Image: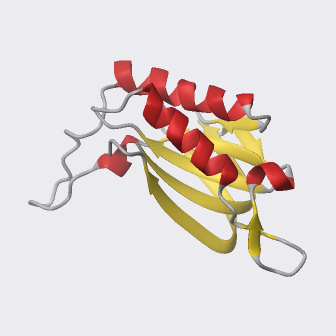
């Protein structure tokens, strides 16, 4: 699994002009599921993301986690994160999981984050989505699960 994690002041995702998910301060997570990913990969990423110390403390140091700040998370599926662009001009998506595998793992990750007490909004799996955000920092990280 691969996650692009952005610290945001707020963000939202729309499907056909309808807001399907939005949060205030917290993390926007663009999530790609690989063909070899398993539930432990989702568990790893969920734990890593909620404990990342990327929010500032009173001294201005990145020393607080999403759990420490009471922040929220918006998770949006994005298979294109697994694209291989090394050859030719058209990306190859052979490393991305098919929807029948990816969707349950996407929902598994969302469930694991919710179990940790974080409010989680989501996009709509498989839909064309428009994501808007106000990046905070900007802070943007790429996190891969061990299987990635």
- Tell how many labels: 0
Q: Nearer the viewer, residue 141 or 61?
A: 61
Q: Which residue shows up at 78% across the image and 37% down it? A: 119
Name, please, the residue furthest toward the left.
88
Q: Which residue shows up at 64% across the image and 56% down it? A: 132
Q: Position of residue 143 (x, y in %)?
A: 47, 55
Instruction: Answer with the quarter of the image where residue 60 lies.
Output: bottom right
Residue 20 seen anywhere in this rendered image of the structure: no
Q: Tell me which colouring the rendered structure shows.
A: secondary structure
Query: From the viewer's perspective, is 128 left or right of 81?
Result: right
Question: Which corner quadrant holds the N terminus?
Answer: top left
Q: Position of residue 71 (x, y in %)?
A: 81, 51
Residue 9 seen anywhere in this rendered image of the structure: yes
Q: Nearer the viewer, residue 8 or 109?
A: 109
Q: Position of residue 83 (x, y in %)?
A: 27, 50
Query: From the viewer's perspective, is 120 left or right of 37?
Result: right
Query: From the viewer's perspective, is 94 left or right of 41?
Result: left
- Above or below — where is 63 with respect to 32? below
Q: Nearer the viewer, residue 50 or 12?
A: 50
Q: Which residue shows up at 47% across the image and 20% down it? A: 104
Instruction: Answer with the quarter of the image where residue 58 lies.
Output: bottom right
- Above or below — where is 34 with respect to 38? below
Name, please, the residue furthest toward the bottom.
59
């Amino acid at each position: 699994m691969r996650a692009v994690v952005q610290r945001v002041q707020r963000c939202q995702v729309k499907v056909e002009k309808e807001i399907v998910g939005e949060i205030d301060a917290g993390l926007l997570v663009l999530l790609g599921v690989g063909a070899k990913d398993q539930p432990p990969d989702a568990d790893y990423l969920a734990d890593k993301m909620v404990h990342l110390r990327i929010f500032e403390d009173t001294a201005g140091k990145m020393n607080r986690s999403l759990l420490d700040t009471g922040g929220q998370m918006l998770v949006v599926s994005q298979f294109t994160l697994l694209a291989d662009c090394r050859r030719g001009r058209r990306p190859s998506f052979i490393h991305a999981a098919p929807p029948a595998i990816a969707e349950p793992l996407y929902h598994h990750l969302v469930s694991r984050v919710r179990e940790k007490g974080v409010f989680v909004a989501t996009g709509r799996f498989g839909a064309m989505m428009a994501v808007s955000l106000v990046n905070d920092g900007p802070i943007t990280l790429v996190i891969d699960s061990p299987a990635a």
